[in-house]
Amino acid sequence: MKQNLYEGIPEELPGELSSVLEQSESVKIERIVSDGHASPEGFWYDQPRNEWVLLVSGSAVLSVEQEGEVSRVDLAPGDHLLIPAHRRHRVESTAATEKTVWLAVHF
């Protein structure tokens, strides 16, 4: 059934909105919508699966840890990034003036 990535996005988002679009035993595809959101202070994602993210709209800044060093990654629409399993990362900021829409594939 046809769906649209931009449908069902509320005007007000008190927290990040994550919606699973498709899922199987080996893959999960989700839409994430941020509205000026960031990871909580001191929080790092450390996920058991690879994650490929595509920034569809808005903007975002990530911190990604690799071999004890933390790199800043600025993302604009069309930018994508592979985050290997157990690579610690966090969202430092997302656009405050427009919704940031991500497409994330966990595998």
Image (tube, rainbow, N blue to C red):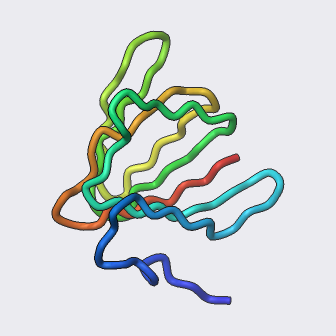
- Front residue of this view, candidates 33 and 74: 33
Which residue of the protein is positioned furthest toward the top in this rendering?
68
Which residue of the protein is positioned furthest toward the front in this rendering?
14
Residue at coordinates 37% horizontally, 41% vertically from top-left?
39
Q: Position of residue 74 (x, y in %)?
A: 28, 41
Q: Is residue 31 above or below residue 54?
A: below
Q: Quadrant of the N terminus?
A: bottom right
Residue 22 quadrant: bottom right
Residue at coordinates 38% horizontally, 59% vertically from top-left?
15
Q: Is residue 31 above or below residue 104?
A: below
Q: How many marks?
A: 0
Q: Is residue 28 above or below residue 7?
A: above
Q: Is residue 49 left or right of residue 44?
A: right
Q: Is residue 57 left or right of residue 16?
A: left
Which residue of the protein is positioned furthest toward the bottom in this rendering?
1
Q: Position of residue 13 (x, y in %)?
A: 33, 67
Residue at coordinates 49% horizontally, 11% vertically from top-left?
67
Q: Is residue 70 left or right of residue 5?
A: left
Residue at coordinates 54% horizontally, 36% vertically from top-left?
83
Q: Position of residue 5 (x, y in %)?
A: 48, 76
Q: Is residue 44 left or right of residue 23?
A: left
Residue 40 quadrant: top left
Q: Is residue 51 above or below residue 98?
A: above
Which residue of the protein is positioned furthest toward the right in this rendering?
25
Q: Position of residue 99 (x, y in %)?
A: 29, 66
